[in-house]
Amino acid sequence: MRDVLSPRWILSLQALPMKRYRSLFAAFLWMAAIFFFSSFPADELPYFGLWDLLLKKSGHLAGYAVLGALFLRSWEDLGIRMKRAISLALLAAVVYAITDELHQSFVPGRHASMVDVLIDGIGSAIGLLALHFLRKWRRKMDGPLPTQGS
């Protein structure tokens, strides 16, 4: 089993074709988007009245669902086995959620929230499950080819 943090594994990344890095690049772009939206001071954020809390927490859930799925795809593309890739994807998304909340604590009018980290973690898990079931559905839809006599 490969140890992801070992220097030998990191050096082996140099031998990978660039297309294997595309999904990792997509994950980093998504992280940059999350960072960008977290950087707005509270007084510059839109207010949605009664729907404000629901819409903002749904944004956390959806944003981190995408991030979790992107991380899973990234780890798989780098050759990490499924079970380990799932664990790493969830861990990476939650660690990023924590750092994002810490970042928000330095933004005027914003604060760090463990509730948001929990919502982000749940969103990541939903993204992982959604990707899993989407793949399962696609395999079922592709199915075996019909025989000549059918």
Image: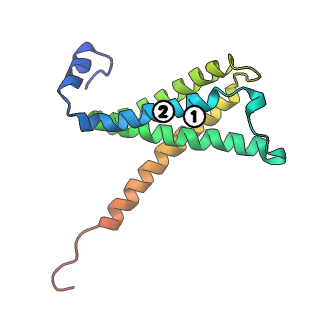
Residue appearing at x 69%, y 18% in the figure: 105
- The picture places residue 121, in percent across and down from the top left corner, at 57, 34
User: Going from the N terminus, do you reach mark 1 or mark 2 first?
Assistant: 2
Residue appearing at x 69%, y 22% in the figure: 112
Residue appearing at x 28%, y 33% in the figure: 78
Question: Against 138, is 36 above or below?
Answer: above
Residue appearing at x 38%, y 54% in the figure: 135
Drawn side of residue 115 relative to residue 140, left or right: right
- The picture places residue 39, in percent across and down from the top left corner, at 64, 26
Calculate the distance from the C-alpha at mark 1 to the C-alpha at mark 2.
7 Å
Please tell me which residue lies in front, 13 or 146.
13
Q: Amino acid at mark 2?
A: Leu
The disc label shown at residue 90, or none: 2
Q: Is residue 81 visible?
A: no
Q: Amino acid at mark 1?
A: Gly
Question: Against 87, is 149 above or below?
Answer: below
Callout 2 secondary element = helix
The outermost residue toward the bottom is: 149
> Which residue does the numbered mark 1 point to in the structure image?
121
- Image quadrant holding the C terminus, namely bottom left
Drawn side of residue 69 relative to residue 73, left or right: right
Question: Against 121, is 112 above or below?
Answer: above
How packed mark 1 is, by other alpha carbons closer than 10 Å (few <14, some 14-19, many 20 or more), is many
- The picture places residue 125, in percent across and down from the top left corner, at 52, 40
